[in-house]
Image: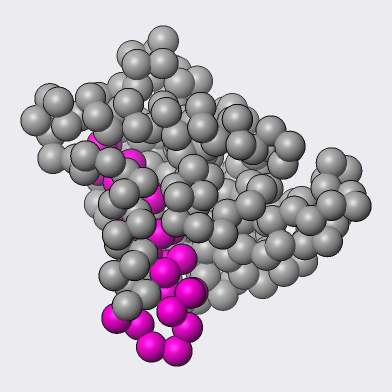
Amino acid sequence: MHMALMQAEPRATAATAIAATAIAATAIAAAATAAVPAPEAAAAKVTAAAAEVAATATGEPAAAGRRGSHLEAHNVLRMLHGVQNLTWSSSLAAAAQDHAEQCAWEHSYRRDAGENMILGRFDTPQQIAQGTAMWYSEICNYDWNDPGYSDTTGHFTQVVWAATSRIGCGYKVCDSVEGAPFCTGRRCGVYTCQYQSPGNWLSTTQFVQNVRRPSAFPAQCKNK
């Protein structure tokens, strides 16, 4: 098993997030046009879900809102691949938050959970959706004729991994991030999500079974 690590520099986050969101949005729009059950606007759906969770939660509405955002941002994309919705795991969220609190640009390397990481600012539902879209945008690099793990697609494959059923995420804005020179002397956010069952097992059979073609590809992708 290999956990992927996306080293996206914060100074490129805005432009890269916009491009990644466009890729995810065109896939969703294409699926909707093809009469596949999919939301009209992922960002709006994420925002609405976050607001609903926050309104009905007790204790920490801000944290509850982020929970809804993380779930919806993933599930709206997993829907395109015909795989089960993820549910929230408090234990995974606690572990992800603990890891983010380390302010270090490296994986936790848990053997019982997959993990995606990214650096940037992810304070709002829209920003969370953009971060998840950045992971998903790797779909354009995936070789459907030669299924398997690649450093350029590992975040995407974990996001849509069919056997994964639970997720928990954490976020910490750090004064600096160890192992990320481009964060030295500036405030960077560490956004981490952990997944069970973990994806990205180094097995072609596992990839064939768990990474399914979407109902519609983004127009930007050349690997349809």
Main SS of residues in magenta = helix
Q: Position of residue 7 (x, y in %)?
A: 70, 38
Q: For the view shown, which residue lies furthest in the top direction?
A: 222
Which is nearer the eye, 37 or 187?
Answer: 187
Residue 71 within the segment the image draws in magenta: yes
Q: For the view shown, which residue lies furthest in the bottom direction?
A: 59
Question: Which colour scheme appears in the figure?
Answer: one colour
Which is nearer the eye, 170 or 64?
Answer: 64
Q: Is residue 126 left or right of residue 171?
A: left
Q: Position of residue 174 (x, y in %)?
A: 77, 62
> Image height check: is 52 above or below 158?
below
Q: Is residue 206 left or right of residue 110?
A: left
Instruction: Residue 190: tell me if it is visible.
Output: yes
- Residue interval drawn in magenta: 56-82
Quadrant in the picture for residue 9: top right
Please name the residue shown 45% across and 50% down the image. Answer: 126
Please name the residue shown 34% across and 54% down the image. Answer: 46
Residue 139 within the segment the image draws in magenta: no
Task: Tell me the quarter of the image containing the N terminus.
Answer: top right
Task: Tell me the quarter of the image containing the C terminus.
Answer: top left
> Image height check: is 131 above or below 59?
above
Q: Position of residue 216 (x, y in %)?
A: 25, 24
Q: Is residue 106 left or right of residue 88?
A: right
Quadrant in the picture for residue 210: top left
Q: Position of residue 136 (x, y in %)?
A: 45, 36
Please name the residue shown 38% across and 32% down the image. Answer: 24
